[in-house]
Amino acid sequence: FGVSGGFAVLNNNDYTGSNFAYYDVTDGVSGNKSFILNFDAATHNPPSSSTVQVYLEFYNGTTLLGTSSKYTVKNDFSTYGLLPASISHTSPSNTNRIRVVGLA
């Protein structure tokens, strides 16, 4: 995991297995509230056998309450650059933390 040009870069070396990076958000988080994540994403190696995804996890403390739909990144950075995407989800009751997850 690294940062390049202000963007998070995950698994640029194509390591095998599942590689995750995440960021936890607590400010302004509560249950039964609509949240939208707007982001730009790309992969450097499509099509590949690995999956590149971005999604949200909703927690109360350490208990996972739910997961948003998973956005699968398929666009090639060298061809299209970073493309905008978004995920929206309503938080389950008792949510007090949202985890933004990147998987590569």
Image (tube, rainbow, N blue to C red):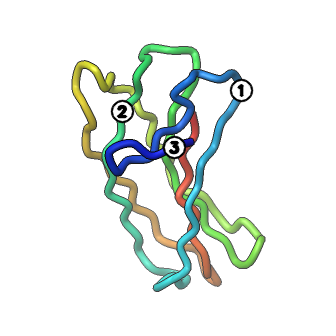
Q: Residue 67 vs residue 6: left or right?
A: right
Give yes or no for contact between labels 2 and 3 (Cβ–Cβ under 8 Å). Answer: no
Residue for badge 1: 17
Q: Position of residue 36 (x, y in %)?
A: 36, 65
Q: Residue 15 vs residue 79: left or right?
A: right
| Quarter of the image that includes the C terminus | top right
Q: CA distance from mark 2 to mark 3?
A: 15 Å
Q: Is residue 42 above or below residue 86?
A: above
Q: CA distance from mark 2 to mark 1?
A: 19 Å
The circle drawn on residue 42 is 2
Q: Residues within 10 Å of mark 2 (few under 14, many from 20)?
A: many
Q: Earlier in the sequence, mark 2 or mark 1?
A: 1
Q: Is residue 4 above or below residue 76?
A: below
Which mark's residue is nearer the viewer, 3 or 1? 3
Residue 21 vs residue 89, the one in the foreground: 21
Which mark's residue is nearer the viewer, 2 or 3? 3
